[in-house]
Image (cartoon, helix red, strand yellow):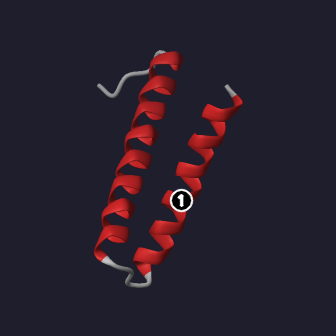
Amino acid sequence: MIGLLLVVLALAVGGCVCVVWAARGGPRWVRAVSRLTLGAAGLLRDMDKNRSRNRSGGSDD
């Protein structure tokens, strides 16, 4: 279990490094990893918003 958490942590840190490197004009593969990292972060943010909205019982109507 700890090994899995370490792998997830390493991927998250690596993704953050790629985002910063891509902002400074890194190679093509870094920009691709950066896009994947930012896309995954956006999906997680949306899922968290939906979960908290469903938990509070609110609606957007």
Q: Is residue 44 left or right of residue 1?
A: left
Q: Amino acid at mark 1?
A: Gly
Residue for point 46% across, 67% down:
18
Quadrant position of residue 47: top left
Q: Is residue 44 left or right of residue 31?
A: right
Q: From this viewpoint, which residue is outermost toward the bottom? A: 25
Residue for point 47% across, 24% down:
51
Q: Quadrant of the N terminus?
A: top right
Q: From this viewpoint, which residue is outermost toward the front? A: 3
Residue 60: x %, y % from top left: 33, 28
Q: Is residue 26 left or right of residue 11?
A: left
Label 1 CA crowd tier, 10 Å (few <14, some 14–19, many 20+): some
Residue for point 51% across, 26% down:
52
Residue sitting nearer the eye, 41 or 33: 33
Residue for point 30% across, 63% down:
32
Q: Which residue is mark 1?
A: 14
